[in-house]
Amino acid sequence: MTTLTASGTATLKSVNPATGEVVGEVPVATAAEIEAVVLRARAAQPAWRALGLEKRAERVAELGAKLVSRADELGLLLTQEMGKPLPEGIGEVKHCGEQLGETLQEIVEALQPEVVEDDTVISTIYHDPFGVCAAITPWNFPLAMPHWTVIPALIAGNTVVVKPSEETPLIAQAYVDLLSESLPDGVLQIVHGADEAGKALVGADVNLIVFTGSRDAGRHILGAASDGLKRVILELGGKDPMIVLDDADVTEAAKFAVRNSFRNAGQVCVSTERIYVADSIADQFEQEVVKLTAEQKVGDGVEEGVTVGPMINTRQRDHVLAQIDDAVAHGAKVLAGGEGHHDGFVMPTVLGGVTHDMDIMRTETFGPVACIARFSDVDEAVALANDTPYGLGAAVFGGSSERAGEVARRLDAGMVGINRGCGGAAGTPWVGAKQSGYGYHSGREGHRQFTQSRVVTAPK
Protein backbone atom coordinates (compact mmCIF):
# COMPACT_ATOMS: atom_id res chain seq x y z
CA MET A 1 0.00 0.00 0.00
CA THR A 2 1.14 3.57 -0.70
CA THR A 3 0.94 6.26 2.01
CA LEU A 4 2.20 9.82 2.52
CA THR A 5 4.67 10.84 5.20
CA ALA A 6 4.36 14.08 7.14
CA SER A 7 6.64 15.73 4.59
CA GLY A 8 4.34 14.70 1.74
CA THR A 9 6.69 12.04 0.41
CA ALA A 10 4.93 8.90 -0.78
CA THR A 11 6.07 5.62 0.73
CA LEU A 12 5.27 2.04 -0.17
CA LYS A 13 4.46 -0.23 2.75
CA SER A 14 5.23 -3.93 2.38
CA VAL A 15 2.62 -6.09 4.12
CA ASN A 16 3.04 -9.70 5.22
CA PRO A 17 0.26 -11.54 3.33
CA ALA A 18 -0.01 -14.18 6.06
CA THR A 19 -0.51 -11.79 8.98
CA GLY A 20 -1.39 -8.39 7.52
CA GLU A 21 1.48 -6.84 9.48
CA VAL A 22 3.69 -4.17 7.89
CA VAL A 23 7.16 -5.59 7.23
CA GLY A 24 8.74 -2.28 6.22
CA GLU A 25 8.49 0.57 3.75
CA VAL A 26 10.40 2.26 0.95
CA PRO A 27 10.07 5.63 -0.78
CA VAL A 28 8.06 5.77 -4.00
CA ALA A 29 9.97 7.26 -6.92
CA THR A 30 8.37 10.08 -8.86
CA ALA A 31 8.58 10.30 -12.64
CA ALA A 32 11.21 13.04 -12.32
CA GLU A 33 13.29 10.91 -9.95
CA ILE A 34 13.10 7.95 -12.32
CA GLU A 35 14.29 10.14 -15.17
CA ALA A 36 17.26 11.25 -13.06
CA VAL A 37 18.09 7.65 -12.14
CA VAL A 38 18.13 6.67 -15.81
CA LEU A 39 20.41 9.62 -16.60
CA ARG A 40 22.85 8.40 -13.93
CA ALA A 41 22.71 4.92 -15.42
CA ARG A 42 23.49 6.28 -18.87
CA ALA A 43 26.39 8.32 -17.55
CA ALA A 44 27.85 5.26 -15.81
CA GLN A 45 27.46 2.90 -18.77
CA PRO A 46 30.51 3.80 -20.93
CA ALA A 47 32.99 3.13 -18.12
CA TRP A 48 31.19 -0.08 -17.14
CA ARG A 49 31.33 -1.26 -20.74
CA ALA A 50 35.00 -0.34 -21.03
CA LEU A 51 35.84 -2.52 -18.03
CA GLY A 52 35.51 -5.58 -20.23
CA LEU A 53 33.57 -8.81 -20.06
CA GLU A 54 35.80 -10.78 -17.68
CA LYS A 55 36.39 -7.85 -15.30
CA ARG A 56 32.66 -7.21 -15.06
CA ALA A 57 32.11 -10.87 -14.20
CA GLU A 58 34.78 -10.67 -11.48
CA ARG A 59 33.00 -7.73 -9.86
CA VAL A 60 29.64 -9.48 -9.89
CA ALA A 61 31.07 -12.80 -8.67
CA GLU A 62 31.52 -11.37 -5.17
CA LEU A 63 27.74 -11.56 -4.75
CA GLY A 64 27.64 -15.37 -4.65
CA ALA A 65 29.26 -15.90 -1.26
CA LYS A 66 27.27 -13.01 0.23
CA LEU A 67 23.96 -14.56 -0.78
CA VAL A 68 24.93 -17.94 0.61
CA SER A 69 26.18 -16.54 3.92
CA ARG A 70 23.05 -14.42 4.40
CA ALA A 71 20.54 -16.93 3.03
CA ASP A 72 18.75 -17.43 6.36
CA GLU A 73 18.33 -13.71 6.96
CA LEU A 74 17.29 -12.86 3.41
CA GLY A 75 15.11 -15.95 3.14
CA LEU A 76 13.17 -14.89 6.22
CA LEU A 77 12.61 -11.42 4.78
CA LEU A 78 11.48 -12.99 1.51
CA THR A 79 8.97 -15.22 3.29
CA GLN A 80 7.65 -12.37 5.41
CA GLU A 81 7.07 -10.25 2.32
CA MET A 82 5.80 -12.87 -0.10
CA GLY A 83 4.46 -15.71 2.05
CA LYS A 84 6.14 -18.82 0.64
CA PRO A 85 7.35 -21.47 3.12
CA LEU A 86 10.58 -20.45 4.81
CA PRO A 87 12.68 -23.38 3.48
CA GLU A 88 11.68 -22.29 -0.03
CA GLY A 89 12.55 -18.67 0.71
CA ILE A 90 15.97 -19.62 2.05
CA GLY A 91 16.44 -22.03 -0.84
CA GLU A 92 15.70 -19.32 -3.40
CA VAL A 93 18.43 -17.09 -1.98
CA LYS A 94 20.94 -19.89 -1.52
CA HIS A 95 20.40 -21.33 -4.99
CA CYS A 96 21.08 -17.96 -6.64
CA GLY A 97 24.31 -17.63 -4.67
CA GLU A 98 25.54 -21.18 -5.20
CA GLN A 99 24.86 -21.15 -8.94
CA LEU A 100 26.30 -17.70 -9.62
CA GLY A 101 29.79 -18.88 -10.58
CA GLU A 102 28.45 -21.34 -13.13
CA THR A 103 26.04 -18.74 -14.48
CA LEU A 104 28.78 -16.15 -14.92
CA GLN A 105 30.99 -18.61 -16.77
CA GLU A 106 28.10 -19.48 -19.07
CA ILE A 107 27.40 -15.79 -19.82
CA VAL A 108 31.05 -14.95 -20.47
CA GLU A 109 31.38 -17.87 -22.88
CA ALA A 110 28.14 -16.92 -24.67
CA LEU A 111 29.24 -13.32 -25.23
CA GLN A 112 32.72 -13.99 -26.58
CA PRO A 113 33.37 -12.61 -30.10
CA GLU A 114 32.93 -15.17 -32.87
CA VAL A 115 34.97 -15.33 -36.05
CA VAL A 116 33.34 -16.44 -39.31
CA GLU A 117 35.19 -16.49 -42.62
CA ASP A 118 34.82 -17.51 -46.23
CA ASP A 119 37.13 -17.38 -49.25
CA THR A 120 37.26 -13.59 -49.44
CA VAL A 121 36.51 -12.01 -46.04
CA ILE A 122 36.79 -12.59 -42.32
CA SER A 123 33.99 -11.39 -40.05
CA THR A 124 33.85 -10.99 -36.30
CA ILE A 125 30.50 -11.10 -34.53
CA TYR A 126 30.56 -9.00 -31.37
CA HIS A 127 27.91 -9.01 -28.64
CA ASP A 128 27.79 -5.43 -27.41
CA PRO A 129 25.61 -3.87 -24.69
CA PHE A 130 22.49 -1.94 -25.60
CA GLY A 131 23.05 0.74 -22.96
CA VAL A 132 20.53 1.08 -20.14
CA CYS A 133 18.32 -1.88 -19.20
CA ALA A 134 15.02 -1.47 -17.33
CA ALA A 135 14.19 -4.61 -15.33
CA ILE A 136 10.59 -4.86 -14.12
CA THR A 137 10.33 -7.93 -11.93
CA PRO A 138 7.50 -9.89 -10.23
CA TRP A 139 6.67 -10.81 -6.65
CA ASN A 140 6.43 -14.61 -6.80
CA PHE A 141 10.21 -15.17 -6.94
CA PRO A 142 11.19 -11.74 -5.64
CA LEU A 143 14.93 -12.36 -5.40
CA ALA A 144 15.46 -14.93 -8.14
CA MET A 145 13.69 -12.97 -10.87
CA PRO A 146 15.72 -9.76 -10.38
CA HIS A 147 18.82 -11.98 -10.19
CA TRP A 148 18.10 -13.76 -13.48
CA THR A 149 17.55 -10.42 -15.20
CA VAL A 150 20.20 -8.22 -13.63
CA ILE A 151 23.16 -10.62 -13.92
CA PRO A 152 23.15 -11.18 -17.71
CA ALA A 153 22.32 -7.52 -18.32
CA LEU A 154 25.28 -6.34 -16.22
CA ILE A 155 27.79 -8.84 -17.59
CA ALA A 156 26.81 -7.81 -21.11
CA GLY A 157 27.90 -4.26 -20.22
CA ASN A 158 24.53 -2.65 -19.70
CA THR A 159 23.70 -0.57 -16.67
CA VAL A 160 20.45 -1.57 -14.97
CA VAL A 161 17.51 0.10 -13.27
CA VAL A 162 15.30 -2.36 -11.36
CA LYS A 163 11.63 -1.70 -10.62
CA PRO A 164 10.52 -4.62 -8.43
CA SER A 165 6.92 -5.51 -7.67
CA GLU A 166 5.26 -3.17 -5.22
CA GLU A 167 4.31 -6.29 -3.25
CA THR A 168 7.93 -7.24 -2.45
CA PRO A 169 10.13 -4.13 -2.45
CA LEU A 170 12.24 -4.97 0.60
CA ILE A 171 13.88 -8.18 -0.58
CA ALA A 172 14.61 -6.60 -3.96
CA GLN A 173 16.16 -3.59 -2.22
CA ALA A 174 18.31 -5.90 -0.10
CA TYR A 175 19.47 -7.74 -3.22
CA VAL A 176 20.37 -4.55 -5.09
CA ASP A 177 22.16 -3.13 -2.04
CA LEU A 178 24.23 -6.30 -1.66
CA LEU A 179 25.25 -6.46 -5.32
CA SER A 180 25.90 -2.71 -5.53
CA GLU A 181 28.66 -3.04 -2.94
CA SER A 182 30.83 -4.49 -5.72
CA LEU A 183 29.80 -2.09 -8.49
CA PRO A 184 30.63 1.49 -9.50
CA ASP A 185 28.03 4.16 -8.74
CA GLY A 186 25.14 4.27 -11.16
CA VAL A 187 25.69 0.81 -12.64
CA LEU A 188 22.81 -0.77 -10.70
CA GLN A 189 19.95 1.24 -9.22
CA ILE A 190 16.46 0.53 -7.93
CA VAL A 191 13.22 2.50 -8.01
CA HIS A 192 10.00 1.66 -6.20
CA GLY A 193 6.34 2.11 -6.96
CA ALA A 194 3.37 0.52 -8.64
CA ASP A 195 2.01 0.98 -12.17
CA GLU A 196 2.90 4.66 -12.50
CA ALA A 197 6.55 3.98 -11.65
CA GLY A 198 6.64 1.14 -14.18
CA LYS A 199 5.16 3.34 -16.89
CA ALA A 200 7.65 6.11 -16.14
CA LEU A 201 10.57 3.70 -16.39
CA VAL A 202 9.34 2.20 -19.65
CA GLY A 203 8.90 5.72 -21.04
CA ALA A 204 12.34 6.89 -19.90
CA ASP A 205 15.50 6.92 -22.01
CA VAL A 206 16.21 3.19 -21.70
CA ASN A 207 17.37 0.87 -24.46
CA LEU A 208 16.16 -2.52 -23.25
CA ILE A 209 13.09 -3.46 -21.20
CA VAL A 210 12.95 -6.86 -19.51
CA PHE A 211 9.63 -7.72 -17.92
CA THR A 212 8.14 -10.75 -16.20
CA GLY A 213 4.45 -10.63 -15.35
CA SER A 214 0.96 -10.77 -16.78
CA ARG A 215 0.12 -10.96 -20.46
CA ASP A 216 -1.96 -7.77 -20.28
CA ALA A 217 0.85 -5.78 -18.66
CA GLY A 218 3.31 -7.14 -21.20
CA ARG A 219 1.07 -6.04 -24.03
CA HIS A 220 0.98 -2.48 -22.64
CA ILE A 221 4.76 -2.44 -22.25
CA LEU A 222 5.25 -3.63 -25.82
CA GLY A 223 2.97 -0.89 -27.08
CA ALA A 224 4.70 1.80 -25.02
CA ALA A 225 8.13 0.64 -26.20
CA SER A 226 7.12 0.69 -29.85
CA ASP A 227 7.49 4.46 -30.31
CA GLY A 228 11.22 4.31 -29.67
CA LEU A 229 11.57 0.76 -31.03
CA LYS A 230 13.14 -0.19 -27.72
CA ARG A 231 14.28 -3.78 -27.38
CA VAL A 232 11.92 -5.84 -25.22
CA ILE A 233 12.11 -9.25 -23.51
CA LEU A 234 8.83 -10.43 -22.02
CA GLU A 235 7.92 -13.52 -19.99
CA LEU A 236 4.15 -13.47 -19.74
CA GLY A 237 2.86 -16.33 -17.66
CA GLY A 238 1.09 -19.48 -18.71
CA LYS A 239 -1.72 -21.97 -18.39
CA ASP A 240 0.45 -25.05 -18.31
CA PRO A 241 -1.05 -28.41 -19.25
CA MET A 242 -0.07 -31.87 -18.02
CA ILE A 243 -0.96 -34.96 -20.03
CA VAL A 244 -1.04 -38.30 -18.21
CA LEU A 245 -0.97 -41.17 -20.71
CA ASP A 246 -2.56 -44.55 -20.03
CA ASP A 247 0.82 -46.25 -19.41
CA ALA A 248 2.08 -43.60 -16.95
CA ASP A 249 3.27 -44.32 -13.43
CA VAL A 250 0.13 -43.02 -11.74
CA THR A 251 1.74 -42.50 -8.33
CA GLU A 252 4.61 -40.44 -9.73
CA ALA A 253 2.29 -38.47 -11.98
CA ALA A 254 0.03 -37.65 -9.03
CA LYS A 255 2.99 -36.56 -6.91
CA PHE A 256 4.13 -34.18 -9.63
CA ALA A 257 0.61 -32.84 -10.22
CA VAL A 258 0.14 -32.00 -6.54
CA ARG A 259 3.62 -30.54 -6.12
CA ASN A 260 3.44 -28.43 -9.27
CA SER A 261 -0.13 -27.27 -8.74
CA PHE A 262 0.32 -26.19 -5.12
CA ARG A 263 3.98 -25.09 -4.94
CA ASN A 264 4.25 -21.46 -3.88
CA ALA A 265 0.45 -21.59 -3.42
CA GLY A 266 0.18 -22.07 -7.17
CA GLN A 267 1.78 -18.68 -7.76
CA VAL A 268 4.32 -19.90 -10.29
CA CYS A 269 4.36 -19.10 -14.00
CA VAL A 270 4.86 -22.80 -14.82
CA SER A 271 2.35 -24.18 -12.30
CA THR A 272 0.35 -27.11 -13.61
CA GLU A 273 -3.04 -25.48 -14.20
CA ARG A 274 -4.70 -28.07 -16.48
CA ILE A 275 -4.39 -31.85 -16.12
CA TYR A 276 -5.62 -34.24 -18.83
CA VAL A 277 -5.72 -37.90 -17.78
CA ALA A 278 -6.47 -41.00 -19.84
CA ASP A 279 -9.88 -42.46 -19.02
CA SER A 280 -8.49 -45.88 -18.08
CA ILE A 281 -6.39 -44.53 -15.19
CA ALA A 282 -8.37 -41.42 -14.26
CA ASP A 283 -10.09 -42.87 -11.17
CA GLN A 284 -6.81 -44.08 -9.70
CA PHE A 285 -5.07 -40.80 -10.53
CA GLU A 286 -7.79 -38.70 -8.91
CA GLN A 287 -7.69 -40.85 -5.77
CA GLU A 288 -3.91 -40.39 -5.49
CA VAL A 289 -4.17 -36.63 -6.00
CA VAL A 290 -6.91 -36.31 -3.38
CA LYS A 291 -4.86 -38.30 -0.87
CA LEU A 292 -1.75 -36.18 -1.41
CA THR A 293 -3.76 -32.96 -1.27
CA ALA A 294 -5.00 -33.89 2.20
CA GLU A 295 -1.37 -34.00 3.36
CA GLN A 296 -0.73 -30.34 2.53
CA LYS A 297 -0.34 -27.95 5.47
CA VAL A 298 -1.61 -24.42 4.92
CA GLY A 299 -0.36 -21.51 7.01
CA ASP A 300 2.16 -18.75 7.63
CA GLY A 301 5.34 -19.65 5.80
CA VAL A 302 7.46 -19.23 8.93
CA GLU A 303 5.60 -22.05 10.68
CA GLU A 304 7.26 -25.45 10.65
CA GLY A 305 5.90 -27.94 8.14
CA VAL A 306 3.85 -25.46 6.10
CA THR A 307 3.72 -26.41 2.43
CA VAL A 308 1.19 -23.87 1.15
CA GLY A 309 1.35 -20.23 2.16
CA PRO A 310 -1.04 -17.33 1.52
CA MET A 311 -2.06 -15.59 -1.66
CA ILE A 312 0.03 -12.48 -2.23
CA ASN A 313 -2.97 -10.16 -1.74
CA THR A 314 -6.75 -10.11 -1.47
CA ARG A 315 -7.15 -9.34 -5.17
CA GLN A 316 -5.36 -12.55 -6.13
CA ARG A 317 -7.25 -14.54 -3.48
CA ASP A 318 -10.59 -13.26 -4.75
CA HIS A 319 -9.65 -14.08 -8.34
CA VAL A 320 -8.84 -17.70 -7.45
CA LEU A 321 -11.99 -18.17 -5.36
CA ALA A 322 -14.15 -16.65 -8.09
CA GLN A 323 -12.72 -19.12 -10.63
CA ILE A 324 -13.44 -22.06 -8.29
CA ASP A 325 -17.01 -20.87 -7.68
CA ASP A 326 -17.60 -20.33 -11.40
CA ALA A 327 -16.30 -23.81 -12.26
CA VAL A 328 -18.54 -25.46 -9.65
CA ALA A 329 -21.53 -23.46 -10.87
CA HIS A 330 -20.88 -24.81 -14.36
CA GLY A 331 -20.66 -28.44 -13.32
CA ALA A 332 -17.19 -29.07 -11.95
CA LYS A 333 -16.97 -31.38 -8.94
CA VAL A 334 -14.90 -30.57 -5.86
CA LEU A 335 -12.79 -33.67 -5.20
CA ALA A 336 -10.72 -32.11 -2.39
CA GLY A 337 -10.60 -28.77 -0.61
CA GLY A 338 -13.00 -26.18 -1.91
CA GLU A 339 -13.81 -24.89 1.58
CA GLY A 340 -12.13 -23.53 4.66
CA HIS A 341 -10.61 -20.59 2.79
CA HIS A 342 -9.86 -17.80 5.25
CA ASP A 343 -8.10 -14.46 5.44
CA GLY A 344 -5.38 -14.53 2.80
CA PHE A 345 -5.38 -18.30 2.40
CA VAL A 346 -6.94 -20.47 -0.29
CA MET A 347 -7.11 -24.13 0.67
CA PRO A 348 -5.58 -26.50 -1.90
CA THR A 349 -8.47 -27.54 -4.11
CA VAL A 350 -8.90 -30.35 -6.64
CA LEU A 351 -11.62 -30.06 -9.27
CA GLY A 352 -12.85 -32.88 -11.51
CA GLY A 353 -15.18 -32.78 -14.47
CA VAL A 354 -13.77 -29.49 -15.74
CA THR A 355 -14.28 -28.38 -19.34
CA HIS A 356 -12.96 -25.63 -21.57
CA ASP A 357 -16.28 -23.82 -21.22
CA MET A 358 -15.10 -22.84 -17.73
CA ASP A 359 -12.98 -19.76 -17.09
CA ILE A 360 -10.65 -21.76 -14.84
CA MET A 361 -9.51 -23.77 -17.87
CA ARG A 362 -8.89 -20.70 -20.03
CA THR A 363 -7.67 -17.85 -17.79
CA GLU A 364 -4.48 -18.05 -15.72
CA THR A 365 -5.38 -18.97 -12.12
CA PHE A 366 -2.12 -18.48 -10.21
CA GLY A 367 -3.49 -20.24 -7.16
CA PRO A 368 -3.51 -23.66 -5.44
CA VAL A 369 -6.04 -25.42 -7.68
CA ALA A 370 -5.58 -28.70 -9.57
CA CYS A 371 -8.06 -29.09 -12.44
CA ILE A 372 -8.50 -32.62 -13.83
CA ALA A 373 -10.16 -33.50 -17.13
CA ARG A 374 -10.35 -36.89 -18.84
CA PHE A 375 -9.57 -37.85 -22.43
CA SER A 376 -10.30 -40.89 -24.56
CA ASP A 377 -7.47 -40.65 -27.08
CA VAL A 378 -4.15 -38.86 -27.39
CA ASP A 379 -5.23 -36.62 -30.26
CA GLU A 380 -7.98 -35.25 -28.03
CA ALA A 381 -5.51 -34.62 -25.20
CA VAL A 382 -3.10 -32.74 -27.47
CA ALA A 383 -5.90 -30.62 -28.92
CA LEU A 384 -7.13 -29.69 -25.44
CA ALA A 385 -3.62 -28.94 -24.18
CA ASN A 386 -3.01 -26.63 -27.15
CA ASP A 387 -6.40 -24.90 -26.81
CA THR A 388 -4.96 -21.76 -25.18
CA PRO A 389 -3.20 -18.54 -26.19
CA TYR A 390 -0.47 -19.43 -23.67
CA GLY A 391 2.54 -21.64 -24.32
CA LEU A 392 5.08 -21.45 -21.52
CA GLY A 393 5.56 -24.95 -20.09
CA ALA A 394 3.96 -28.38 -20.24
CA ALA A 395 4.49 -31.92 -18.97
CA VAL A 396 3.80 -35.39 -20.35
CA PHE A 397 3.81 -38.49 -18.17
CA GLY A 398 4.00 -41.92 -19.76
CA GLY A 399 5.63 -45.32 -19.36
CA SER A 400 7.29 -45.18 -22.77
CA SER A 401 9.71 -42.27 -23.08
CA GLU A 402 9.53 -42.53 -26.86
CA ARG A 403 5.74 -42.31 -26.93
CA ALA A 404 5.69 -39.51 -24.36
CA GLY A 405 8.34 -37.69 -26.38
CA GLU A 406 6.21 -37.89 -29.51
CA VAL A 407 3.33 -36.31 -27.62
CA ALA A 408 5.64 -33.65 -26.17
CA ARG A 409 6.74 -32.60 -29.66
CA ARG A 410 3.12 -31.91 -30.59
CA LEU A 411 2.57 -29.43 -27.76
CA ASP A 412 2.63 -25.68 -28.39
CA ALA A 413 4.86 -24.85 -25.43
CA GLY A 414 8.33 -23.41 -25.19
CA MET A 415 9.43 -26.01 -22.62
CA VAL A 416 8.07 -29.53 -22.13
CA GLY A 417 9.10 -32.02 -19.45
CA ILE A 418 8.74 -35.78 -19.85
CA ASN A 419 7.95 -37.44 -16.51
CA ARG A 420 9.21 -34.26 -14.82
CA GLY A 421 8.87 -30.49 -14.80
CA CYS A 422 9.56 -28.34 -17.84
CA GLY A 423 12.88 -26.77 -16.73
CA GLY A 424 15.79 -27.87 -18.92
CA ALA A 425 19.41 -28.79 -18.35
CA ALA A 426 21.99 -26.15 -17.43
CA GLY A 427 22.61 -23.98 -20.46
CA THR A 428 19.11 -24.27 -21.94
CA PRO A 429 16.91 -21.19 -22.33
CA TRP A 430 13.81 -20.32 -20.33
CA VAL A 431 11.50 -19.76 -23.26
CA GLY A 432 7.78 -19.37 -23.84
CA ALA A 433 5.80 -19.88 -27.03
CA LYS A 434 2.71 -18.09 -28.33
CA GLN A 435 1.56 -15.35 -25.93
CA SER A 436 3.72 -16.58 -23.05
CA GLY A 437 6.93 -15.11 -24.40
CA TYR A 438 8.37 -12.33 -26.49
CA GLY A 439 12.07 -13.01 -26.52
CA TYR A 440 13.52 -15.17 -23.77
CA HIS A 441 16.40 -15.45 -21.34
CA SER A 442 18.98 -17.91 -19.97
CA GLY A 443 21.18 -20.27 -21.93
CA ARG A 444 23.61 -19.19 -24.61
CA GLU A 445 21.05 -17.60 -26.93
CA GLY A 446 19.06 -16.12 -24.04
CA HIS A 447 22.11 -14.31 -22.67
CA ARG A 448 22.75 -12.86 -26.10
CA GLN A 449 19.33 -11.20 -26.12
CA PHE A 450 20.77 -8.71 -23.64
CA THR A 451 23.19 -7.57 -26.36
CA GLN A 452 23.32 -5.96 -29.77
CA SER A 453 25.00 -8.28 -32.28
CA ARG A 454 27.50 -6.37 -34.40
CA VAL A 455 29.38 -7.72 -37.40
CA VAL A 456 32.75 -6.28 -38.42
CA THR A 457 34.14 -7.59 -41.71
CA ALA A 458 37.52 -7.15 -43.38
CA PRO A 459 39.08 -8.62 -46.56
CA LYS A 460 41.42 -11.54 -46.15
Image (cartoon, rainbow, N blue to C red):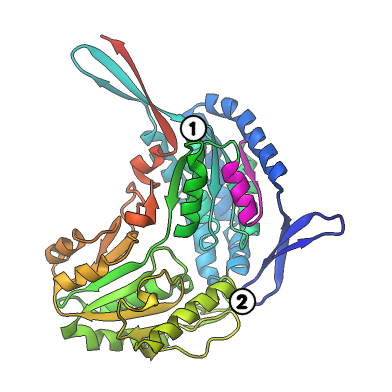
Q: Quadrant of residue 69?
A: bottom right
Residue situated in front as seen by the camera: 382 or 252: 382
Badge 2, how many Cα within 10 Å: few under 14, some, many 20+?
many
> Is residue 380 shown above or below 28?
below
Amino acid type, callout 1: Phe
Residue at image point 32% right, 86% down: 352
Whole-number angstrom distance, CA of label 2 to CA of label 1 = 41 Å
Residue 280 got which mark? Answer: none
The N terminus appears in which quarter of the rendering?
bottom right
SS at mark 1? loop
Q: Position of residue 109 (x, y in %)?
A: 37, 34
Looking at the rendered structure, the number of numbered marks drawn on it comes to 2
Magenta residue check for 192: yes
Residue of label 1 = 130
Extreme residue toward the top, this view: 460
Residue extent of the magenta highlight: 186-203
Q: Position of residue 266 (x, y in %)?
A: 45, 72
Residue 18 got which mark? Answer: 2
Residue at image point 23% right, 68% down: 396
The C terminus appears in which quarter of the rendering?
top left
Residue at image point 26% right, 59% down: 412
Residue situated in front as seen by the camera: 2 or 74: 2
- The answer to whether residue 96 shows anywhere in this view is no
Q: Position of residue 233 (x, y in %)?
A: 44, 46
Q: Earlier in the sequence, mark 2 or mark 1?
A: 2
- The answer to whether residue 117 shows anywhere in this view is yes
Residue situated in front as seen by the camera: 211 or 271: 211
Q: Position of residue 430 (x, y in %)?
A: 37, 52
Amino acid type, callout 2: Ala
